[in-house]
Amino acid sequence: MGRKFDLSSLMETVSNLDTTAAAPSVQLIPLEDILDNKANFYRVDPAELKPLADSIAMDGLQQYPLVTPHPDQPGKYLLLSGHRRCAALRLLAEDPENPREDLRQVPCTVRRYESPAMAELQLILANSTARVLTNAEIAKQAERMELLLYQLREEGYEFPGRMRDQVAAACKVSAPKLARLKVIREKLKAPEFLLLFETDKLPEQTAYALARLPEDLQQRLALISTDIPGNVADMLLKKCGDGWRWEPEMQCPDGKTCKRGDSFLRHDLEHPYEMCGGRTCCLECPRAQNEYAPCDRMCSKAQAVRKAQRDEKKAALEAEAQKRTRRYQRETQVNAQRVLRAIEAAGLPDREHIPWESMDRLYAGLIRQYAAGEFPDEACRYGAELSPSRLGDPAKTAKVLGCSTDYLLGVTDELGRAEPPPPPIPPPALEPAPTRNEGISAQDREALDKLYDLLEDADAISPDIAAALRWAISVIERALGGTL
């Protein structure tokens, strides 16, 4: 009958082993007789030893190392737990400036095991409870623990439940996470990615996606870049599931098969939301033909075609610009000849500035060149000059040229200044009012007398009212043909 084996009770025992409470099993062992266990895959960071050594130097060992007699070397002991502590003790004992000889005798908890597998299991459980493990350490721990449990089963031990659940419980992780780590452990083949994962520099999500890619694709990715975000790795995995292999099958114009698979793969790593997978020839890809922000991974043939197209387009645009410039120059020459007529009539020298637009460089000499059809480089490239519609201050320019604004604006061909407008016709003068009391009836005279009485009162109230009333009386008197 097989022996019952309760892993949870063993884990509980481990949590109490590494203390000084187990005094009967504690022995003083020379430091040189304590050997590192090759089965210990847990990483010892040298940067962490100095603070630990300082703590031991000040306060001594707070937890004793756990050892077991060496199976092949009598008098020697194998470490099961406390590798960092023993490394810190060696650091203190071998200090060239101040060696601590008192630390060469190390109190250790000594345990003996019937099965080497049980001893290694003890090592794993002891170390797993003493530190925060990386994903790589959890993966190795699960791998070794699974092998050890199977070995113990062959030795006659019985385990309740499924093996996967036993391992997950011992590693203190969920079964799905353990399954992901197993996939990474077994299928992540590219050494570059493995090294990053083991040094905790490759996230689990990314490593899990990369591990499910074909091995040759992993190798190609590692040669291109090891800095792959998790979402990009997931997108590559999805495309791979759709049949993408980044191995183009199209032929180049020379009849040879395209060999730019790694370039397509690099493009999709750099532009994950514009993946092409090498399934479209660069000569036919719309992104290679974009006027702005074209694909930066197109082949040399596509670059040559793009350059030829751009050069052709540039030449066409330049030809159109030159044609437009010649048209502007012809218009400018006609305009300049008209202005030159006024310049010659006024006898202006070449250095005379002719104001036209708000900001210009027009001088009489330049206008003479324009009128003769002589234009400097870049002249009139963006429009005709000396256009009446662009004349900023017609009166100012007309004054300089000694001509009329009508001539500058094209209203007349006569240079002379326009005749001033006739003065406004003054309004007809009011006829003088007839003499007082002439032609006014007694009734009207009585009414006017009342108004004059009101005028006297208004003078005392408000000058404005009085002025308005006085004006009204004068109008009435004129209408009646006399004054009082």
Image (cartoon, rainbow, N blue to C red):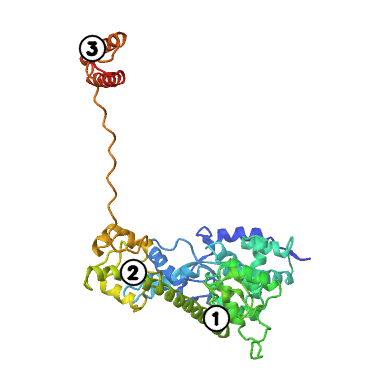
| Label 2 element class | helix
Residue bearing mark 3: 457
Residue 9 in view in this figure: yes
Q: Nearer the viewer, mark 3 or mark 1?
A: 3
Determine whether 209 is above or below 457 in the image.
below
Tag 1: residue type?
Answer: Gln
Q: CA separation, marks 2 and 3?
A: 72 Å
Q: On the picture, is 7 further left or further right than 420? A: right
Asked where in the image residue 62 lies, by quadrant, the reply is bottom left
Residue bearing mark 1: 309
Q: Nearer the viewer, mark 2 or mark 3?
A: 2
Tag 2: residue type?
Answer: Arg
Determine whether 431 is above or below 345 in the image.
above
Name the residue: 46% across, 78% down. Answer: 318
**Residue 165 image offset from top left, x and y in percent:** 70, 61
Tag 3: residue type?
Answer: Asp
Q: Nearer the viewer, mark 1 or mark 2?
A: 2
| Label 1 element class | helix
**Residue 251 image offset from top left, x and y in percent:** 67, 86
